[in-house]
Every structure is written in C-alpha cells, then in structure tokens.
Image: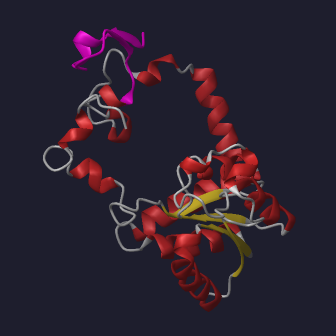
C-alpha cells in the first residue's frame, strides 16, 4: 500500500508516482469524519512507529514543550494573532529568554522594528546580518557574471556564520527574517537552537510567496507549464 499509478491518482504528466498527501482529496486524518483512502500515505506507518512518536511528543522535554506550546497558541488564538505575536507567545511559553535573529540585509528596517517589539515584551534578542564576514562572492567560486552588481565588491550571504554566531550567543530560539532560498536551509542546518520564520523572502510578491499559488490559474498560469526557471 502507498504506491499507485499516476493515472489513477489524477496526476497529469507523470508516468509513475508514489501516492502522497498532495494527491489526497479526503484529508480524513484531520477530523476522522469519513474513511481513509486506500493508498493513504499514513498506511505505511506502523502502530509501533506511531506509539514511538507519541512517546517522543510526551516524554522528550524539549519536544513536548514546543509541541504543547504551539498547540496551545493555535487553540487559544486561532485567527487572532499575527505571526509576530505568535512568535512572542511561543517564545514565552517555551521559556526562550534570548531570541536570535538571522536577517537579510534588505530587511534590516523590518528587523529593527521586530527587535523593538521583542524589547517591549521583555524579550532579549541578538541579530546577525546575512553579509556578516564581508567575503566577496568570487572568493568562494562564484563567477563575476553571477553577481547582482557585476564588477563590484559583493559579499556572499553567510548563513553558516550567522548560525555559528547565534550558537555562540546561546540563543534559545532563532528567527529567520528574509533569508534567501537555500541560505535559509544552510542556516537551519547549522543552528543549534530551534528555528522559526518571521518573513519568507519573495521580492517580486512583497514577501508573500503564497500569492503565486493563489494566482496560478490566471496571472501566474505560466508556473503550471514545464518551462525552465
């Protein structure tokens, strides 16, 4: 169970695929108001695995505190708090006294406002900008013609150093503010503290990447075509 032919899944353009949650039209796992599909992704998870996961959520003190805090915020404030407020509420509930901020150079104004908000709620913070270290892109093998402003000094984004400096500061929770795709991945990989995101960068859509999905049937219909990006 778990593998089906794409023809049966309604996935156009694929010869074979694994049935996953993106193919499901039932989502019975949420409310259990009906039946699970025959090829449910969760069907490959054994009862032993589920029991082990339950114990992890219950017995691991860090996991338990984070999971319970997130659920409590959702249940108490669903649809009422902004992302900024949710981060403040989450930090308080998990006992995070010092928040690390990994920010994009282009979002420093937003970061400064966020720092003021944290301070107003008696939360300490430590911010590290993406260009920290000031290493020219060519020094790590990036070609000159791949710079945004060719022929000038242009520092790399340095998410690994951002993470290492926040690790040194022993932050309790790290917040991403607009790191580039891939740079955010590296930051998360090297961060010792748990990571959440305040702003997901999308320069074209005013940092609202979901807009491309909402408009994919008309303005951004090109996204559904198999074209090189």
Judged from this view, the residue extending furthest toward the right is: 168
Q: Quadrant of residue 20?
A: top left
Number of numbered discs on residues: 0
Q: Residue at x 21, y 45 (%)?
A: 216
- Viewer can see residue 63: no
Front-lying residue, 195 or 158: 158
Asked if the stretch drawn in magenta spans residue 18, the answer is yes
Judged from this view, the residue extending furthest toward the left is: 218
Asked if the stretch drawn in magenta spans residue 147, the answer is no
Judged from this view, the residue extending furthest toward the bottom is: 120
Q: Residue at x 27, y 48 (%)?
A: 213
- Residue 27 to residue 2: above or below: below
- Residue 107 shown left or right of residue 139 in the figure: left
- Residue 115 to residue 228: above or below: below
Q: How is the image coloured?
A: secondary structure
Q: Which percent across, then down, holds residue 90?
A: 59, 68
Q: Which percent across, then down, holds residue 2?
A: 42, 14
Front-lying residue, 55 or 95: 95
- Residue 36 to residue 116: above or below: above
Front-lying residue, 184 or 137: 137
Q: Name the image quarter holding the N terminus.
A: top left
Q: Which percent across, then down, holds residue 157?
A: 65, 58
- Viewer can see residue 46: yes
Q: Residue at x 86, y 65 (%)?
A: 168
- Residue 124 shown left or right of residue 106 in the figure: right
Q: Residue at x 62, y 38 (%)?
A: 54
Please provide the residue range marked out in magenta. 1-21
């Amino acid at each position: 169970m778990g593998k089906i032919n794409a023809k049966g899944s309604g996935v156009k353009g694929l010869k074979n695929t694994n049935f996953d949650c993106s193919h499901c039209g039932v989502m019975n796992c949420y409310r259990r108001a009906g039946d699970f599909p025959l090829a449910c992704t969760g069907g490959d998870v054994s009862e032993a695995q589920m029991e082990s996961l339950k114990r992890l959520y219950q017995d691991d003190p860090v996991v338990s505190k984070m999971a319970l805090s997130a659920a409590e915020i959702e249940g108490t404030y669903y649809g009422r708090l902004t992302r900024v407020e949710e981060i403040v509420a989450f930090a308080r509930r998990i006992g995070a006294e010092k928040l690390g901020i990994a920010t994009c150079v282009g979002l420093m104004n937003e970061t400064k406002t966020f720092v003021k908000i944290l301070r107003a709620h008696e939360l300490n913070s430590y911010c590290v900008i993406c260009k920290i270290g000031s290493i020219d892109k060519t020094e790590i093998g990036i070609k000159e013609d791949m710079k945004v402003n060719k022929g000038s000094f242009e520092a790399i984004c340095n998410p690994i150093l951002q993470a290492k400096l926040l690790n040194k500061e022993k932050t309790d929770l790290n917040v991403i503010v607009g790191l580039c795709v891939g740079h955010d991945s590296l930051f998360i990989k090297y961060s010792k503290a748990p990571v959440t995101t305040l702003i997901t960068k999308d320069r074209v859509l005013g940092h609202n990447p979901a807009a491309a999905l909402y408009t994919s049937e008309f303005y951004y219909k090109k996204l559904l075509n198999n074209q090189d990006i």
